[in-house]
Amino acid sequence: AQSVAQPEDQVNVAEGNPLTVKCTYSVSGNPYLFWYVQYPNRGLQFLLKYITGDNLVKGSYGFEAEFNKSQTSFHLKKPSALVSDSALYFCAVRDRSGSGYALNFGKGTSLLVTP
Amino acid sequence: GAVVSQHPSRVICKSGTSVKIECRSLDFQATTMFWYRQFPKQSLMLMATSNEGSKATYEQGVEKDKFLINHASLTLSTLTVTSAHPEDSSFYICSARGTGLHYEQYFGPGTRLTVT
């Protein structure tokens, strides 16, 4: 089965500092990896994805993620955090075992950026 | 961009009644729609996958008779929670996937269901 793991329940960062939200994956074959952000009582907003190609993927709102095959990781990063980045972040992998290619999500990481 | 809407955004119902949640793709045709459930401070769990015009495929442990899914058109899928109970209270999120440029999943804003 295709799965991802987010080892941190919460990440705290001071505004202006760089942030990293960790994700590792376990897949057979080449992974299709995604990052989404969720604000309270809202649906998911797409940030970025990795399908193939350049290991550094740039996404929305200044976020980027680095695909590392040897470490089976896909960490989300941002050079300078904003208070407005505080939200719940989900890493996901496309499940190619089912008929619909749904997404399997990690448990989520709550990011808190303090002024 | 691709937009997916859900209606209602919030619903409160009494135990034993049924509730219907609509998921619409507003500017693209969704050949596949997914329904997820999210408990507080937890991840999204896939409930079922539906393809337009065919029966939904339910994940293990999801009662198909309780969570009725209909995907009658390329822009609309509905989830009906039948004979709702308090333990069905949750945040339900749909996503839609089209073809070509719209092959990725686009998520709706979610529906907060509270069963009293």
Image (cartoon, coloured by chain):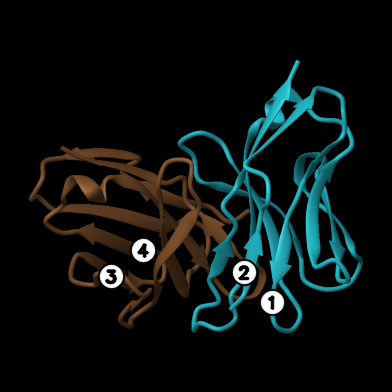
Chain colours: A cyan, B brown
Q: Nearer the viewer, mark 4 or mark 1?
A: 1
Q: Nearer the viewer, mark 3 or mark 4?
A: 3
Q: Which quadrant is the N terminus of chain A positioned in?
A: bottom right
Q: Residue at x 49, y 64 (%)?
A: B96
Residue B76 is marked as: 4
- Residue at disc 2, secondary structure: strand
Indicate the chain on which mark 4 is placed.
B
Circle 1: residue type: Val
- Residue at disc 3, secondary structure: strand
Indicate the chain on which mark 3 is placed.
B
Indicate the chain on which mark 2 is placed.
A
The residue beneath circle 3 is B70
Closer-to-camera residue (A94/A106):
A106
Q: Is residue A106 left or right of residue B95?
A: right
Q: CA distance from mark 2 to mark 3?
A: 28 Å
Circle 3: residue type: Asn
The residue beneath circle 1 is A27
Q: CA distance from mark 1 to mark 3?
A: 31 Å
Q: Nearer the viewer, mark 2 or mark 3?
A: 2
Label 2 neighbour load within 10 Å: few <14, some 14-19, many 20+: many
The residue beneath circle 2 is A3
- Residue at disc 4, secondary structure: strand
- Residue at disc 1, secondary structure: loop
Q: CA distance from mark 4 to mark 1?
A: 32 Å
The image position of residue A54, as x and y in percent, is: 92, 66
